Image (cartoon, helix red, strand yellow):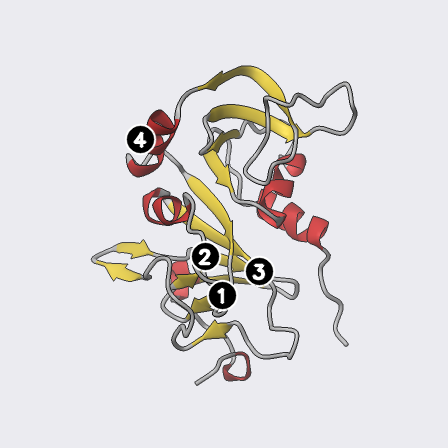
Amino acid sequence: MAERLDEQTMALRVAREFQNGMVVNLGAGTPVLASNYVPEGREVIFQSENGCLGYGRIAQTDEERDFNLINAGGQFVVGNLGMCFFDHAESFSMIRGGHIDLCVLGGLQVSEKGDLANWLIPGREPGAIGGAMDLAFGAARLVIVMTHTTKEKEPLTLKQLWLKALHAGGRAGEQMEGVFKKITRIGTWDWWTSMLNVPSRYLVR
């Protein structure tokens, strides 16, 4: 079997997407781990929809843990100089106003057009969209971190989603909408330059 990336290595790969000065929102799960891997000398401003701008890496010790400071995954994080706090209305004004440069979310399925499903699994209704719909639509770039196949080895990159979509992809003139990049345990796929150029064996027709 080919070597697969572990969760920490996937988070490290996510951090390679961070550019200096970016405002970045990290979703729960693997995405939030990327705050531990900001490249040296690069300033990245992390925003959390629960009302925080400018937090840092995940806290490692009891002394660093502050019960008032958590990320989207409920993990304690450390503060950075200049960090600020605000209410949900202000937070979602940032998100819906297009002030998030990069959003990294988990995913259940992605289509060849960049459609994303990540909030509802059949049999687990009613599901919970949370802030993901606003983030997927409002962020300038959307990166998805997910497993490459199901436990039954069925592909999760599809011609067409069969789970309920969170956000639709495609082109609007020169603007790419939907998923910008997908990172899995076996590789990275970029929708921006080629929409999707994945060998057919990885796709469900």
Please report whichever mark, 4 or 3, sits nearer to the chain's N-terminal start.
Answer: 4
Q: Amino acid at mark 1?
A: Ile
The secondary element bearing badge 2 is classed as: loop
Please report whichever mark, 4 or 2, sits nearer to the chain's N-terminal start.
Answer: 4
Q: Amino acid at mark 4?
A: Ser
The secondary element bearing badge 4 is classed as: helix
Q: Which residue is mark 4?
A: 93
Badge 1 vs badge 2, beta-carbon distance below 8 Å = yes
Q: Which residue corresponds to the image point at 49% horizontal and 72% vertical from the top-left?
A: 157
Q: Amino acid at mark 2?
A: Gly
Disc 4 and disc 2: Cα gap in Å?
24 Å
Above or below, 42 relative to 187 = above
Q: Position of residue 201 (x, y in %)?
A: 55, 84
Disc 3 and disc 1: Cα gap in Å?
15 Å
Q: Is residue 3 left or right of residue 200?
A: right
Q: Which residue is mark 2?
A: 127
Disc 4 and disc 3: Cα gap in Å?
28 Å
Q: Which residue is mark 1?
A: 121
Q: Position of residue 180 (x, y in %)?
A: 42, 55
Q: Amino acid at mark 3?
A: Met
Quadrant the N terminus occupies: bottom right
Q: Position of residue 61 (x, y in %)?
A: 79, 25
The secondary element bearing badge 3 is classed as: loop
Please report whichever mark, 3 or 1, sits nearer to the chain's N-terminal start.
Answer: 1
- The crowding category of the residue bearing disc 3, from other C-alpha atoms within 10 Å (few below 14, some 14 to 19, many at least 20), is many
Disc 1 and disc 4: Cα gap in Å?
29 Å
The secondary element bearing badge 1 is classed as: loop
Q: Which residue is mark 3?
A: 146
